[in-house]
Amino acid sequence: MIAATLLAATPFEDSPFWNPDLPGSFWSVFGILLAGTAVLTIAFVVWMVIQPDEPEHDTTELVDRAVGRERDRARIISRRLDADAGRADTSEPELR
């Protein structure tokens, strides 16, 4: 019985939150923003499709040099760890 009374006396019927009466300028601004978002999304998708999968210039030499440097660095670190643990000779200059 109390629930029926509360439901019958809803103060939300005339509330602007539940019944928005928005001016026409809002809908035009909303439409422009929506259209801009759609255009930018389509442009981004087209740009991603056009992008090449591989770079235009050959990067094999750069990759080979970087891999060589990283392998040398990893080898030195491994030897330093071995020297710190007492498993290698520490008389070499690069291990000090």
Image: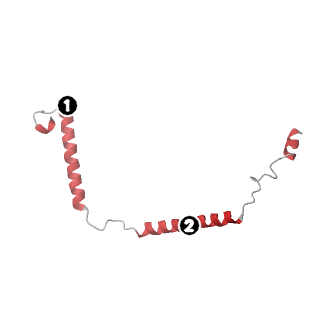
Q: Residue tagged by mark 1? A: 84
* Relative depth, front residue between 70 and 6: 6
Residue type for callout 2? Gly
* Relative depth, front residue between 83 and 10: 10
Image quadrant assignment for residue 65: bottom left
Q: Residue at x 21, y 60 (%)?
A: 61
Residue 5 x %, y %:
88, 42
Residue type for callout 1? Asp
Residue 1 x %, y %:
89, 39
In the displayed orientation, state which residue is furthest to the top. Answer: 86
Give how far apart the Cα atoms at labels 2 and 1 are. 62 Å
Residue 73 x %, y %:
21, 45
- Secondary structure of the residue carrying numbered label 2: helix
Query: Does 65 sit above or below residue 44?
Result: above
Q: Residue tagged by mark 2? A: 36
Q: Residue at x 17, y 31 (%)?
A: 87
Q: Looking at the image, what colour scheme do you see?
A: secondary structure
Residue 82 x %, y %:
19, 34
Query: Does 47 sit above or below residue 21?
Result: below
Q: Residue at x 68, y 65 (%)?
A: 25
Closer to viewer: mark 2 or mark 1: 2
Image quadrant assignment for residue 27: bottom right
Q: Which mark is residue 58?
A: none
- 76 relative to 17 in the view: left or right: left
- Secondary structure of the residue carrying numbered label 1: helix
Q: Who comes first in sequence, dot 2 or dot 1?
A: 2
Q: Which quadrant of the rendered structure holds the C terminus?
A: top left
Q: Residues within 10 Å of mark 1 (few under 14, many from 20)?
A: some
- 70 relative to 45 in the view: left or right: left
Q: Residue at x 24, y 61 (%)?
A: 60
